Amino acid sequence: MKRIALRYASAGALIALIVLCLAWELRLAPLRPGGSWLAMKALPLVFPLVGILRGRVYTYQWASALALIYGAEGLVRWWSESGIASGLALIEFFFATIFTVSAALYVRQHQTVT
């Protein structure tokens, strides 16, 4: 897979993960009616966004480790929640996995080129 495709896949998955976290906890299935403070879980995902969009390898490295936390949360909440929250958790796991894999492949291809 070409590096540019991996960059787009990583950036798209990261942005989708941020949007999902916000929509989930503020609108779709919040823990409390009207939204919850759990929406703040999207904040750590915003920090690597500029570096990911610019293709900085170091950002890809640490952000892929960060995404593992969201993948784990998605699996746990998929297992423990019911209804729409269970489906959203599975989507969260899917986006986190796409980001982690595409970021790792991007770093790997970058290292073989240099």
Image (spheres, helix red, strand yellow):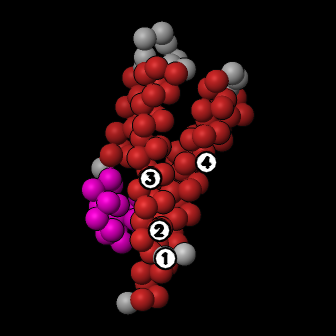
Position of residue 46 in the picture relative to residue 1 (left or right): left
Question: What whole-number distance in Å separates the C-alpha atoms at marks 1 and 2?
Answer: 5 Å
User: Would residue 64 be visible to someone looking at this image?
Assistant: no
Q: Nearer the viewer, mark 1 or mark 4?
A: 1
Looking at the rendering, in which quadrant would you find the N terminus? bottom right
Contact between labelled residues 4 and 1, with CB atoms less than 8 Å apart: no
Residue 60 picture location, percent across and down: 40, 65
Q: Residues within 10 Å of mark 2 (few under 14, many from 20)?
A: few
Contact between labelled residues 4 and 2, with CB atoms less than 8 Å apart: no
Say what amino acid the circle numbered 1 marks.
Lys
Q: Of the residues under marks 3 and 2, which one precedes in the sequence? A: 2
The residue closer to the viewer here, 2 or 88, is 2
Tell me which segment is drawn in magenta: 48-65
- At 58% across and 54% down in the image, what residue appears? 97
Q: Of the residues under marks 2 and 4, which one precedes in the sequence? A: 2
Q: Residues within 10 Å of mark 1 (few under 14, many from 20)?
A: few
* Residue where numbered disc 1 is placed: 2
* Residue where numbered disc 2 is placed: 5
* Residue where numbered disc 4 is placed: 94
Q: Residue 58 magenta-drawn?
A: yes
The residue closer to the viewer here, 43 or 15, is 15
Question: What whole-number distance in Å separates the C-alpha atoms at marks 2 and 4?
Answer: 18 Å
Query: Which of the 4 quarters of the picture holds residue 76?
Result: top right
Residue 21 picture location, percent across and down: 46, 34
- At 41% across and 46% down in the image, what residue appears? 15
Question: What whole-number distance in Å separates the C-alpha atoms at marks 3 and 2?
Answer: 10 Å
Question: What whole-number distance in Å separates the C-alpha atoms at marks 1 and 4?
Answer: 21 Å
Say what amino acid the circle numbered 4 marks.
Phe
Q: Of the residues under marks 1 and 4, which one precedes in the sequence? A: 1
* Residue where numbered disc 3 is placed: 12
- Magenta stretch: helix, strand or loop mostly: helix
